[in-house]
Each structure stands twice: as C-alpha cells, then as structure tokens.
Image (spheres, coloured by chain):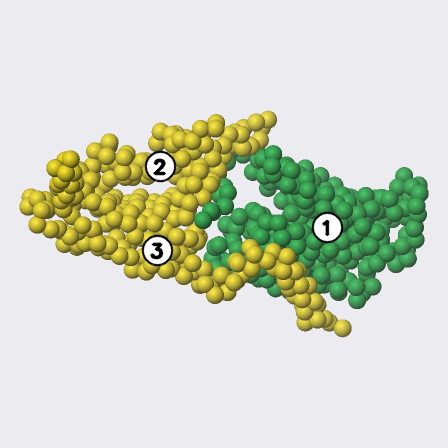
Chain colours: A green, B yellow
Amino acid sequence: MQLYLPIADLPVNVFLVLAMGAAVGFVSGMFGIGGGFLMTPLLIFIGITPAVAVASVTSHIAASSFSGALSYWRRRAIDPALASVLLCGGVTGTALGVWTFTQLRALGQLDLMIALSYVVLLGTVGSLMFSEGLRALMRTRRGALPPRRSHNWIHGLPLKMRFKRSKIYLSVIPVVVVGIMIGFIGAIMGIGGGFILVPIMIYLLRVPTSTVIGTSMVLTLVTMLFATMLHAVTNHLVDAVLALILMVGGVTGAQFGVRAGQKIRGEQLRLLLGLLILSVGIRFAIELVIRPEDLFTIRELGVSG
Amino acid sequence: MRRAALAFLLVLLLGSAARAERLIVSVSNHRVTVTPNYSGEELVLFGSVEKDTTTPADRTTYDLVVTVMGPRADMVTRRKERTFGIWINTDYRQFLQVPSYLALFANRPFETITSPEIARRQQIGLNNVLLTQRVSGDFADVVPNDAFRSAFIRLRTQRGLYREDGSAVTFLTPTLFRTGIPLPAEVPIGTYEVEIKLFANGAFIAKTETAFEIVKVGFEQFVATTARQNGLLYGLVTAAMALMTGWMASIVFRKD
C-alpha cells in the first residue's frame, strides 16, 4: 500500500516502513537503545533525504523510548535521581550540539563529519563491547567468577551523592559530564546515544545492569523530545506521517524486544549489540573507502516561488 | 513623418503575416493533485497548427518541440575525490534557479529539426537548455560537456526528473499533434511552464505557452502548511503524538 509523505514529498510503502519501525523497535527494546543509528541509514536507503530522516527519527525514538521507559518504570528499573542528574547534562549538551551542528553546516563537509564520527564512534564502541562480551562469555564457559568490581579514579571525585535505587554512591560530576557528552553527540549525529550511554554507565560509573537500561531510556526520551521540537521549529523537516508509521511499528517491536532482552543473559546481549554496532560502523567505513558508484551528488537548496 | 510611420506599420504587419501559423494547445489537466495514493501520473498535451491564407502552400510538414519546466530551485552538485584514502566532497558547483523538473519532447531527433545555431538560441535539447552556474563569482552557463553539467543532467535523468525524447510528439494529422508528459512519483510541487515551439524546414516559426500546476490537497496540504507556518505547534503535536503512541503501546502490551 503506497502512501504519500507530506514533508518528505515522496510515496512510500506503508508496510515496508512499518516493518522497518518494528525491526528497529525490537532491537531498541532489547538493548535499551534508541535505535537511531539503525533507523536513519535505513530511511535514507529507501530514498528519504538525510535531513528529513534525521528529523523524523527523533520523534520515533522518543515514542519508542517512552513505551520502553514505562515498562521499565513498572518494574522499578529506573533510578529517578540518577536520571535527573543525567538530564541536567543532557539538555545542556543537546543545545550545545545543535549550535555546533549549525556552525559545521555553514562550513560545509557536515556529511563527512557525520560519516567519520559514525565510523570512529561505532567502530570503537562496537569492538570494545564485542571483545568484552566475548571475554565474559568465555569466563562463564570456564565457570570462573567475574572479576570483583574495583573502584576507579571516578569514585574519588568530590560532590558525592547516594543513588538509592541503583545502590551506588557516586560523584555527580562524571554523571553530568556523561549527560553533556551524550546530548552533544546525539544532536550532531542525529542519534539517541543510548548505545554509548549504556556501556559508559556500566563500565565507568558502575551502575548495576538492573537500572542501567531504564535510566538511559529516560535520558534518550527527553533529549529526543527536545530535538524533535528543535527540528520542527528551525528546519520544518519533521514528517509527522512518516514518524507516526515508524512509531506504531517501533513501539510494537520494542515491547517484544524488552521481553526478549530479559531472557538473554547480559554478556550475550552485549556481544550481540557490539556486533550490531560494529557492523553499522564498518558499513560507514566501507562507504568512505570504496570508490563511490557515482562521484557526483546533487543537493537541492530549497524550491523558491 | 506620417508616411514613415505608415511604412513602419506596414513592415510590422508584413512581419507578423510572415508568421502565418498559430499554435493552439491544451493539457489534459491543469491542476494535478497529489493525494495519499499518488504514485506518478501522465498528462497529455494536445494541440493543432492553425494555418491561414498567408501560409505558404508548400509548407506541409512541421516539427514540434515541447519544453516542460517545473518550479525553479538552486542546486549544488558536488564531486568526490580520494583524499587520505577516503572519498570526500572536494569540489562543487552551484546551479542557480534551474528547473526542478525539465522535459523536452519532439517529433523527431532534436539535432535533425533545426541548425545547431537556432537549436542553441531556442534551447532545443538538454544540451542547449540554459543552466546557470555560479563559477567563482560569475554567473554563466558552461559548455555542454562540462563534467559538473553533464553529471547534473545525468543524475536528474536517473531520478526521472529530467528527460528528453525525440519521438514523444506524434502528429495525428499533418497539423494535429499530441504528447504525453510523464510525472514521476517524487514530483516537485509547484507551477509548471510548458513551451511549444514550431519549426518548418529548420526555421523557427511560432511559439506558444501554457502551464499546469501540481498541488497537494487535503491532509497532505494541511500537514505541509502547518509544518511550515506553525513550527512550534507542529513540533508540540508531534511530540505529544510520540508520547501518546508510546503510552498506548505500553498499555496494550501490558502483561501484568
């Protein structure tokens, strides 16, 4: 069934978009990530312009993470105190990121910057996760005990605060810094940032796995809602019809994803996610290195009159 | 003085009399509406060549060139080059106010219709259509085989937005003609100008113009205008929609 998208100015197959939303939703529910780094390239692949894709995906991620966050909330798997401290940084970071985005666009080469940051970020995070997951898996195979959680330099910082639900006693400084970083990266790359946030929270902040996904979803939800508003007000590029189809598919997929994620063991989950992130990173790297099929590209600067 | 004016008038009259043919054309639909299930359409342009008493009797065969131009826009063509092992955009050209849709149709191959000189002046064929570029501060069109220009035309043609067809116009009788105007699915919204030029024995003899518009209607129109005019409200509604969808899904799928 074909449907004409009013902002993207293009007819799409509703079932195809619905299926894409569901698939990405499943992955996002399972790993507690927004899924923007998967959805945006997929939309571009079916012919939607990158600008509209990025802008519309933000609202899709918001819907997906809201339904996810609600189910985590019912399971008491969200740390409200930790989430609010993260958000202080996240909102600042998003505003900063949007400002940088505008500056970069004025300089040109924004596309290259985005592609390079995808390669670097996804490549690093993906391979780290993959190797860590692999090691953890080997350990459990051999029946060895996981290494004791050691305190690192981060736990020596001042301004400590007790996060009751996560059962950790941590300085607010690294939490705010992480929030700023995620908001900044998210605004520039058009992603939720959950896939970076989750490992940082696990490995650096030592947040227990029971609250990490739900809490990261709260941050994703708020930054993406903020980004949706910003895109709608400044660029008028949010396609509500496209977003709605993606949302319906996304939230449905996410519900099943959440359940699937709880059945799989933590290290296996990390291994899978690592593999997925790594492959998207490699995909971008290949695009940069291999001689493109067509050396020329056209970009419309807006129809006048 | 009066005699001179009279002579001038006479020359003017004779001049217009020399152009004895008149073109009468119409498109099948002057208002194409883009609805939710729009996926491309084909318009039909038909018309006839009207002769009058001053038409030379030996003039029986005509050639016709139809040019359809969509709303104009600025576009940038970029070229990738290998730098430090990766392919990045290095050079670019800006095309100023070029048609977003451009189609040229004729009853026989463009180069056989008229001389290269007239073809250039009348912009017959994609190679002769004026595509203004900004070349280091200057505004000019370049030679047809310029790398950026040909890449631009090639990419637009691939998307079905630029096309030329030397056999699309058919003469049903020596003076009655028709041609189809295919509109792709991702058609630019706006006003389309149609120019019809008549040639006989290689000489340009008459020209007429018509137009049609492509508009969004109903819900599409409403969404598009709201997004443009009330960005804040639109953003709020979209954000609320996202929250509603997420909330409803979590209720629908609630297990416990």
- Comes first in the chain, label 3 or label 2: 2
Residue at image position (60%, 56%) is B231
Q: Quadrant of residue A77?
A: bottom right
B102 or B222: nearer the viewer: B222
One can see residue B99 in this view: yes
Q: Which residue is mark 1?
A: A194
Q: Can residue A16 be seen in the rendering of this structure?
A: no
Q: Dot 1, crowdedness within 10 Å: few (<14), some or many (≥20)?
A: many
**Answer yes or no: do the residues labelled 1 and 3 have beta carbons within 8 Å?**
no
Amino acid at circle 2: Leu
- For label 3, count other residues whose C-alpha is less than 10 Å away and answer few (under 14), some (14-19) or many (20+): many
Label 2 sits on residue: B130
Q: Residue furthest bottom?
A: B256
Asked if the residue at tag 2 contacts the one at tag 3, i.e. Cβ–Cβ closer than 8 Å, the answer is: no
- Which element type, helix, strand or loop, lies under badge 1? helix
Please state the chain letter of the residue tagged with numbered disc 3 in the rendered image: B
> Element under label 3?
strand
- Residue A115 versus residue B32: which sits nearer the camera? B32
The residue lying furthest to the front in this view is B1
The three-letter amino acid code for the residue at tag 1 is: Gly
Q: CA distance from mark 3 to mark 2?
A: 22 Å
Please tell me the numbered disc located at residue B99: none
Amino acid at circle 3: Phe
Q: Residue at x 83, y 63 (%)?
A: A76
Instruction: Note whether A206 is above or below B121 in the view shown.
Output: below
Q: Is B66 placed left or right of B135 in the picture?
A: left
The structure residue drawn at horizontal position 56% and vertical position 32%, both measured from the top left corner, is B88
Residue A48, given in percent of the width and then of the height, sits at: 52, 50
Distance from the alpha carbon under mark 1 to that under mark 3: 49 Å
Query: Is B203 placed left or right of B90 in the picture?
Result: left
Above/below status of B36 relative to A230: below
Q: Which residue is mark 3?
A: B212
